[in-house]
Image: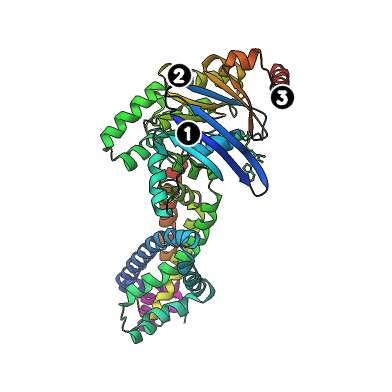
Amino acid sequence: MGLDFSVIPKYLDVILLGALWTIAITVAAALLSFIGGILFAVIALYAPRAIRLPFRAFEWLFMGTPLLLQLFLIYFGLVQIGIDLPAFVAGVIGLGLHFAVYNSELIQTAIVAVDRGQMEAARTLGLSRGEALRKVVVPQAVRDVIPPIGNNMIALLKDSALVSVIGVGELTLSAQLAIGRTYRPFEFYVLAAVFYYVINLGMEAVLRRVERRVQASR
Amino acid sequence: MTDQKPFVDIRHAQKSYGTLEVLKDISLQVQRGQIVAIIGPSGSGKSTLLRAINDLDPLTGGEVWLEDTQVNKKLPHRQYEKHINQVRQDIGMVFQHFNLFPHLTVRDNIKLAPKLLKGLSDAEADKLAEEQLEKVGMLERIDYYPSRLSGGQKQRVAIARALAMKPKVMLFDEATSALDPELVEEVNLVMKKLAEEHMTMIIVTHEMGFAESVCDRVLFMDQGVVVEEGPPEVIFRNPSNERTRNFLRKHLATANK
Ligand SMILES: Nc1ncnc2c1ncn2[C@@H]1O[C@H](COP(=O)(O)OP(=O)(O)O)[C@@H](O)[C@H]1O
Ligand SMILES: [Mg+2]
């Protein structure tokens, strides 16, 4: 049985829909991981001990265990304590928090590296510590790590395939669906790969634009 | 003038880092509109004294007063934070390394604090930024990022940023020490202009010529004490203390090299 790509057009709309879901979940999870990353970094560095210590445990959970397990835990596990999330939401939260923890590590390092004089200048003007962090230190730190955060976002796109296991109809699951009907795994996995590649290119273009804008202030 | 109540009043300032005593019972009174220079060898405690005035480096003993307010008064932590943030709005400070906010344009560097802390509208803050930049001759660079400015330009913007808070007193910590020699004059001119407007200023400097030309009074510090103080013509031309004479002689020798 040779290859036959002529089966593709019939399932193209299924695959396209899957690609749209992949984009949706990636964008939503990327936003969560970005905002969460900033928040987690500030908590890790500045929150009182009573908050910092439980937070460490939470961080360990997301860095030290497989993403797949985290998705199962959020989607299937939380139901038992009465939190019944739609698969898409569970996927966004799982992916988002997982990468938020990685972004947080980057941002923490960058915050610590911001010149001490920045905080001093802000405090001298009368800003509180919180205001100085929010307006002066954190924005600079985030600016400094845009490129590695961008790499995390690309990794997030690729790992979004994992949410297929909790039934989010994204690209990989759509491909599997088409394969189930046609028994043509090679053709549809290659097609899915092409779609991932195109989405990847799109993301890289967006990231380059962001980096260029940030570059203006250097 | 001298019978007036001091505007800035430092009483028995003492500061230790562990066992190292950096300020040893220093008192300094500055009248409104007065300009005081602090000179002395590196490590003598000049920055520490200056930074005690706005409590950036808190004293371990003694008091700092600005008009009728004690800057470093004892308060519970939260109240103290509120108090000090308020007081700092009245004390402008200019650093050796400018400390402009690199992620913000010149305009936004200046607008940030007035908008956030004084509730100025965006339009009001814009107007304020333009006024202050005009004053330091930097208006045409208002939409530049700091990275595209020379050191002298950066420092002039930093002065404008401090002035935008309408401070009662300005502190300068070696404002021209990090500048290439040819950029020093433009910053000095701005400071002279402030002097003509009777801004109260405390200036830590290595530039004896500048100090002599703008200051009403000069303090010579060494090893955490004020060794000698007086009008510039006395301190620079006819100092009575041996340590002052030595410092000035060495300083002139290196400055003329
Ligand atoms: N954070 C600090 N910890 C320990 N020692 C310090 C600290 N800051 C300053 N010092 C010491 O205090 C002394 C005075 O420093 P400083 O006020 O910066 O002097 P100056 O500005 O006259 O050069 C120096 O001996 C310096 O090493
Ligand atoms: Mg110093």
Q: Position of residue A16 (x, y in %)?
A: 33, 68
Q: Position of residue B160 (x, y in %)?
A: 42, 28
Task: State which image quarter holds ligand 2.
Answer: top right
Q: Residues within 10 Å of mark 3 (few under 14, many from 20)?
A: some
- Of marks 2 and 1, which one's residue comes earlier in the chain? 1
- Of marks 1 and 3, which one's residue comes earlier in the chain? 1
Residue B147 to residue A176: above or below: above
Q: Secondary structure at mark 2?
A: helix
Rounded to the nearest whole Å, what is the CA distance between mark 3 and mark 2? 29 Å
Rounded to the nearest whole Å, what is the CA distance between mark 1 and mark 3? 29 Å
Indicate the amino acid at tag 2. Ala
Q: Main secondary structure of the magenta part?
A: helix
Rounded to the nearest whole Å, what is the CA distance between mark 2 and mark 1? 15 Å
Residue B47 to residue A3: above or below: above
Res. B207 image quadrant: top right
> Considering depth in this image, is A188 or B133 the residue closer to the camera?
B133
Query: Label 3 belongs to which residue?
Result: B243
Indicate the amino acid at tag 3. Arg
Which residues fall within the magenta stretch? Answer: A170-189
**Label placed on residue B195:** 2
